[in-house]
Amino acid sequence: MCCITLVTMLTYLDRLNLGVAAKFIQDEFAFDTRTMGWVFSAFLMGYALFQIPGGWAGDRFGPKRVLGLAILFWSLFTALTGLAPRLAAGRWASVLVTFLVIRFLVGAGEAATSPNANKIVMNWMGPGHRGTGASFTILGVGLGGAITPPLIAWIMQKYGWRMAFYLGGALGLGVLLFWQLFVTSTPEENPRVNAAELAQIHSERFGIAPRERYARTPWRRFLSSASCWGLFLAYFCQGFPIYFYHTWFFQYLIQVRHLSIAQTGLWGATPYLAIAVLAPLGGFFSDFASRRFGKRWGRRAAVCVGMGSSAVLLWVGSSMVSTTAAVTALAVGGGMNMFAASTFWATCIDLTPEFTGSLSGMMNTFGNLGGWLSPIVTAFVATSFGWNRALDCAAAVSIASGGLFLLVKADQPLDAAASSGQPGFVKPAVRVAS
């Protein structure tokens, strides 16, 4: 689980660095606010479109191998972001196109991360701990997001914005080495797991060992399920507000709260500190509520508490005069959004242990389509009606997320094997080396 957290930290370093560098890039290439919104969204389009292929590949070939290749791919294009002006031959239109293409490819590479991390959680964690296990991925969001703004701001002030992207690419190679040395797709493949530990994992997970075959992903079953559509649409609405923090929050602090770059580097980390604290609490709460009230209402309660609280904090924080109070409220609002996110990922495992990667990829496609719209819509609303209305819009979408999740019945798995007590896990057809 620690390795999953480390990889997620890397993804958010490579995702948020553009938000921190945006002011320098806008000044250098004369990009206005709406143009920069399209640059932000290029990453999200690539990220959304490749979720399903990335999740399916993890189910088919094993999450370790797929995610290792993904780390190498996106790290290369992160480093190339710093070379975008040279690759564009100096014309501003070509610079814009180059940024769009490179950020699209960074997003396409990172798309495999969350579905495959969730597949590893399914492989290693029992049904009573899925929310907690899923929160390790989101913990990486918080830690990576907390480190990125002050680190990237310092690097840019000292060495320029390009160096921040070169550093991200180099760190990716280090994380890839760590991943290859210490991670396995399943406990069965890990030589450090002894027979007693393996028996306990099997007992907690399904009661018997995994099958040695590959089954076809039931796409039609997913698309005909009301629970799946509730999950997809709710996560679409969850992705819209959280991407305000990933894209425009840094600029909001500069333009609206009038903080310096150094101050923004510190305050820009606060939502991610909140995520680092609240996401694990959300996973624990989701598992506790599921044991206390049953899986259906326990999962629903966790999402409604998280998204409802986030909406209130976004609405209140946007109208506060005090910068300290406003940023604190907005930061906790971001943390409560990810308090709920742990439950979304755990629910993917609840609904289909056998095809967790594929369903996770489908869900995250919708979440990141919402995220893709977020910087564009936020820029439009902010420039047309003001930043307060932009944050009010994010709050309204947060309420919709909690409402739509009420359609999800996490206690009714879609896998025939899981619902009948048979093994719900399929071992990858291709063995992944440890």
Image (cartoon, rainbow, N blue to C red):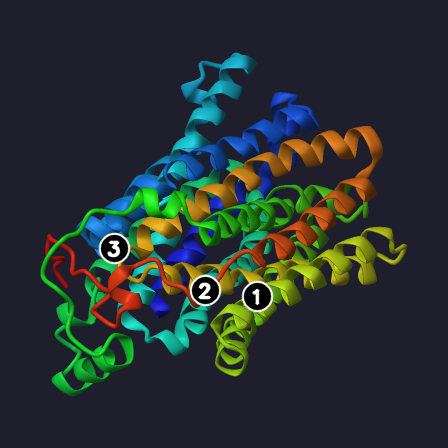
Above or below for 182 versus 394: below
Callout 3 amino acid: Pro
N-terminal of the pair, mark 2 or mark 1, is 1
Say left or right for 329 vs 122: right
Q: Are marks 2 and 1 in contact (CB under 8 Å)?
A: yes
Location of residue 144 in the rendering, given as x and y in whole percent from the top left corner: 50, 58
Q: Residue at x 66, y 54 (%)?
A: 268
Q: Residues within 10 Å of mark 2 (few under 14, many from 20)?
A: many
Residue matched to label 3:
63
- Residue closest to the eye, 121 or 96: 121
Alpha-carbon span between mark 3 and mark 1: 28 Å
Q: Can you see residue 64?
A: yes
In the picture of the structure, the residue carrying the numbered disc 2 is 410
Q: Amino acid at mark 1?
A: Arg
In the picture, which quadrant includes the N terminus?
bottom left
Mark 3: give few (<14), some (14-19) or many (20+) Cα within 10 Å.
many
Q: Position of residue 90 (x, y in %)?
A: 50, 14
Of mark 3 and mark 2, the one earlier in the sequence is: 3
Residue denoted by label 1:
300
State the residue in front, 385 or 22: 385
In percent of width and height, residue 321 lies at: 90, 54
Q: Nearer the viewer, mark 3 or mark 2?
A: 2
Closest to the camera, between mark 3 and mark 1, is 1
